[in-house]
Image (cartoon, coloured by chain):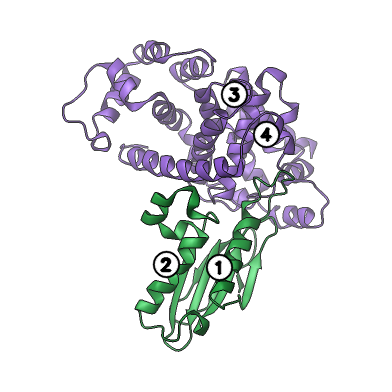
Amino acid sequence: MASTRNNILKVIEEVKLLSPSAVRLLAVASKKDHDLKDIVRVIKHDAALTAKTLQLVNSAAFSLQSKISDLERAIAYSGENFLLSLVMTEAADMIYDCDLAGYDGHKGGLWDHNLLTALAAKRIAELSKEPVNTNVAYTCGLLHDLGKAIISDFLKGSLTQLLASLEKGEMPDYAGAEEKILGIDHTQAGYALACHWNLPEPLASAMRYHHEPAKAPKKYRSLVYAVHLGDMVAMMTGRDTGADAMRYQLDDHYIDFIKITENDLAQIILDTDSDFRTLKESMDEQPGI
Amino acid sequence: MAVILIHPKTRVVGMVHIALPESTINPAKAQDKPGYFADTGIPALIREMMALGCSGGPKQMVAKIAGGAKIMDPHNIFNIGTRNVLAIKKILWKYGVSPRTEDIGGTMSRTVTVSARNGRVILSSPGKEEWRL
């Protein structure tokens, strides 16, 4: 088991690094008080990203009357979240293309799950008792489960044993069962990847603690609770990653951090489903995504 | 959650995928996509099936339900799966129908496949063999 853990950590060390622009963009986007100008500043120094952004905004999905050639207008028009989704898909395509075979998942499932979590986390963050930047919650959601892509191959062949162990009640949740088999779970693998990629602290915290939000550093706890609940919404609505769906515990202390009612949740489910379909439709029109 | 209705006489089979118990949260959405809610989805399914010639009304139909995975939430906010099950059973009961078979609750996601040829309902879940409802 210790050797499997070491092998997984070795795989993480060999994961292709994100482009410098992607790292800078994520660093800017994870700051509480960032604005659109900060995003523009990063994108304009990267010719490929500038071209991609303009191509995106001028695509059929946005149905513009006349073409936009100014980067700032293009970013304002497409919205920061759309841009982050685009950059992350391209930056980590190797991981997003993973078929999650170890979870009996399917290709694209991880991307869909992370995207729905991001959209839900953003809306849930609006209900946080302490102010949380909703765009940061979105970015955290987009990345939160990347550790699954890392450990998926190592879980192949263990699924029956893992599910049996859960059904016997030997483990509290799927992450516990992953750790029992591999010596590391997807949140720990995600955190190691966040360190390898030099991701900012709020993002790394969400990757590590989205199933144990009470353990997140105090200053990011509300943010991580938003991601925790966003993850639940994604699973409840069927945008899951395979065999682990619904096999995690809800931390019921969410009520101390997020002021949410039954009706709020129903509306969030409706709105995120609609946001998800719109975003997917627009991204699917982009060549190479 | 999936509600499957089968009319044995005409061999008409219908299914609706319900996400939320009540449409009062968003009547406009319910107008556009009635299947999203239990209180509009089941009546819409019955209407469609009757329009296809399912005579004798809903009492002549066989109902099967699947899904509704549980989330333990002492605050009763996130346990939508349980609320969906209750809403679906209540509405079916109003039509005088009780599910002949059901596979509900638990902590797993389910995918439902219905054969329009023979009315068989097959369930699957990642990591498990398929089973018949």
Residue ranking furthest to the bottom: B9
For mark 1, give the secondary structure.
helix
Which amino acid, by three-letter code, is at mark 4? Thr
Gap in Å between the C-alphas at discs 1 and 2?
12 Å
Q: In this figure, which residue is indicated by the disc labeled 2? A: B44
Residue drawn at x 61%, y 76% as measured from the top left: B98
Look at discs 3 and 4 and give the one toward the viewer: 3
Taking B105 as reference, is A115 above or below it? above
Q: In this figure, which residue is indicated by the disc labeled 4? A: A187
Asked if labels 4 and 2 touch by Cβ distance under 8 angstroms, the answer is: no
Let me know if marks 2 and 4 both belong to one chain: no
For mark 3, give the secondary structure.
helix
Pointer 4 chain: A
Sooner in the amino-acid sequence: mark 1 or mark 2: 2
| Foreground residue among A59 and A287 | A59
Q: In this figure, which residue is indicated by the disc labeled 1? A: B91
Instruction: Specify the chain shown as green.
Output: B
Q: Is residue A253 left or right of residue A104?
A: right
Residue drawn at x 65%, y 21% as measured from the top left: A220
Q: Check the rendered structure and report the hue given to chain A.
A: purple
Residue drawn at x 34%, y 43% as measured from the top left: A281
Kindly indicate the quadrant of the structure image that contains residue A79: top left
Gap in Å between the C-alphas at discs 1 and 3?
44 Å
Let me know if marks 3 and 2 both belong to one chain: no
Let me know if marks 3 and 4 both belong to one chain: yes
For the C terminus of chain A, give its image quadrant: top left
Q: How many marks?
A: 4
Q: Position of residue A168 (x, y in %)?
A: 82, 57
| Foreground residue among A173 and B44 | B44
